[in-house]
Amino acid sequence: MKKRLIYALNIILLVSVVASLLPTDPPFKLRKVLAQYSWYDTLNLYQNITTYQQAIQNITNTYSFAIDVYVYITNVTNQAKISLYKTTANSTTFITIQDGSITKSEDTYTNLQPSEILSFDVSAKPTSTLTISESITVEKRVELIKSEVVIPPPLPPIIHKYPLTVHVIDLFSMNAPDLTVLIKDSTGTIIANLTTHADGKTDPITLAKGTYTVEIYKDNKFQLSQLVHLTEETTLTLQIGIPIIITFTHIAIIALIIIILLIIILYKKKKHG
């Protein structure tokens, strides 16, 4: 028993150490899209000239809380004619097209405060091969987002569970079948209703570590009650005060004992007579 207890304590300690080393889920942001729309800007390109348009789009936070503004490109015309294109706002670059390729397609401006304005500027420069003026149209998608930091709930506590088997024997230490075994928790609630088999044992039931009450009934009549402190795999043996099965052997033994007692009594009477 002592070795089994030490082994169980070592297992519990090992599980606790491993659980403490497991990574916990970090906080994350839950995104809720409040509004979204498309935005088009058209610019004329001229050879060797960079075209600027300031405040081409202004977004004002009309909400009573801070929001994030997510902008991403969805389409562009005459992309091959572009040497350098940028969409910027409040020192954040959202979109970049360089040498005919989209090198940055999206970005998010975070924590735009109530009544604060996000003012967008665009600039475009054509490639050196442009000989006549061309126009480009850049289509963007805008999403106004409410972000909430969500902290995941802590991991559930580790619940240690162990199998419990109840073994019932009768007055003659014989296995007692067909008995009702009730198992109650610390509040007195019945959590299991079991029956003993031919070997006098119930089916094992797995329960959380704790204290339980085991009650034995024969033909709905109470026989015995026993507390059990479940801290490991347990087979609880209980002896009730009545015989369940009296075999011919038991009858013969009882008869033999009675005969012997009668002989002793008669011998003593005769001796003292």
Image: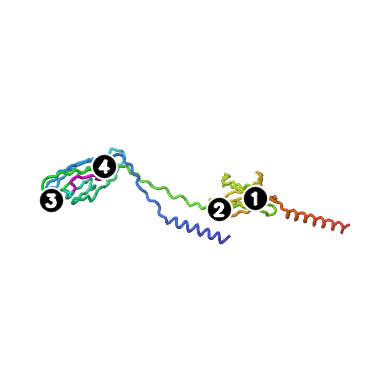
| Quadrant location, the N terminus | bottom right
Question: Which tag, 4 or 2, sits closer to the chain's start?
Answer: 4
Question: How far from the left and from the top, in percent, is residue 164?
Answer: 57, 52
Front: mark 3 or 2: 3
Q: Amino acid at mark 1?
A: Pro
Residue sticking out furthest to the front: 248
Task: Name the residue that disc number 1 marks.
Answer: 177
Q: Amino acid at mark 3?
A: Thr
Residue sticking out furthest to the left: 131
Task: Name the residue that disc number 2 marks.
Answer: 163
Cα distance between the residues tagged 3 and 1: 99 Å
Cα distance between the residues tagged 1 and 2: 20 Å
Q: How many marks?
A: 4
Q: Amino acid at mark 2?
A: Pro
Q: Amino acid at mark 4?
A: Val
Cα distance between the residues tagged 1 and 4: 75 Å
| Residue 68 among those drawn in magenta | no
Cα distance between the residues tagged 3 and 2: 82 Å
Camera-side residue: 81 or 31?
Answer: 81
Front: mark 1 or 2: 1
Q: Main secondary structure of the magenta part?
A: strand
Question: How far from the left and from the top, in percent, is residue 6?
Answer: 54, 60
| Quadrant location, the C terminus | bottom right
Element class at badge 2 = strand
Task: Name the residue that disc number 3 marks.
Answer: 129
Front: mark 3 or 4: 3
Element class at badge 4 = strand
**Would you call the spot at circle 2 few (<14 residues within 10 Å), some (14-19), or many (20 or more)?**
some
Residue sticking out furthest to the bottom: 3
Question: How far from the left and from the top, in percent, is residue 265?
Answer: 83, 56
Please provide the residue range marked out in magenta: 69-79
Residue 144 numbered tag: none
